[in-house]
């Protein structure tokens, strides 16, 4: 298997519907809760059908000056309108939108990975600096 860095795709989320979007709402202060919103398909909607959907988004944090990345969470999207009646006939489907709250003790970078069942892995990052 190739290194993941060779198969993870990157692009501008405003042009590519598979790239995870990371947004921080409100202030970013050391040791205080930070509201983080993750989604796929913000600017260009992802279809999220039985045949073509986002299965998960993972969120990581790389603190400045530290060697190891911290896995903050995995957010699964399990329903894709599957049904015994056929594809896209099910009673429910998930949209890949997530809200989470984290507390950070150092500035660093948030990285999100998303997985599309057809188009593979996609990555995006956002720098987090603390407000004074």
Image: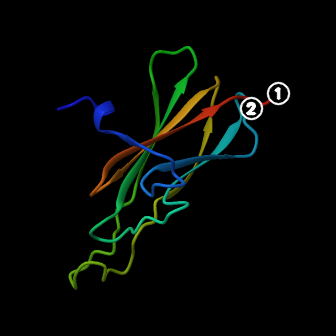
Q: Quadrant of the C terminus?
A: top right
| N-term mark: 2 or 1 | 2
Q: Where is residue 89 in the image (x, y as percent from the top left)?
A: 30, 83
**Residue at image point 22% right, 85% down:** 85
In the image: residue 53, left or right of residue 130: left
- Per the image, label 1 sits on a secondary structure element best described as loop
Q: How crowded is mark 1: few (under 14 residues within 10 Å), some or many (20 or more)?
A: few
Identify whether 110 is placed above or below 19: above
Residue 132: numbered disc: 1
Residue furthest to the front: 15
Q: Position of residue 26 (x, y in %)?
A: 75, 45
Identify whether 17 is placed above or below 26: below
Question: Which of 59/125 is in front?
Answer: 125
Circle 2 is placed at which residue position?
29
Kindly report the distance in space between the C-alpha atoms of the residues bearing marks 2 and 1: 7 Å
**Residue at image point 76% right, 40% down:** 27
Between marks 2 and 1 in the image, the one whose residue lies nearer the viewer:
1
Residue 74, picture quadrant: top left
Residue furthest to the right: 132
Q: Where is residue 82 in the image (x, y as percent from the top left)?
A: 28, 74
Q: How crowded is mark 2: few (under 14 residues within 10 Å), some or many (20 or more)?
A: some
Question: Which of 116/72 is in front?
Answer: 116
């Amino acid at each position: 298997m190739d290194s993941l860095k060779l198969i993870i795709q990157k692009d501008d989320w405003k042009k590519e519907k598979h790239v995870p979007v990371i947004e921080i709402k409100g202030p970013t202060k050391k040791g205080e809760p930070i509201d983080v919103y993750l989604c796929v398909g913000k600017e260009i909607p992802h279809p999220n059908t039985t045949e073509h959907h986002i299965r998960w988004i993972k969120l990581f944090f790389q603190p400045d000056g530290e060697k190891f990345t911290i896995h903050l969470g995995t957010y699964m999207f399990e329903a894709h309108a599957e049904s015994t009646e056929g594809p896209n006939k099910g009673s429910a489907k998930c949209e890949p939108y997530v809200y989470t709250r984290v507390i950070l003790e150092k500035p660093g970078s948030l990285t999100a990975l998303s997985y599309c069942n057809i188009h593979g892995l996609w990555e995006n990052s956002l720098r987090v600096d603390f407000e004074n």
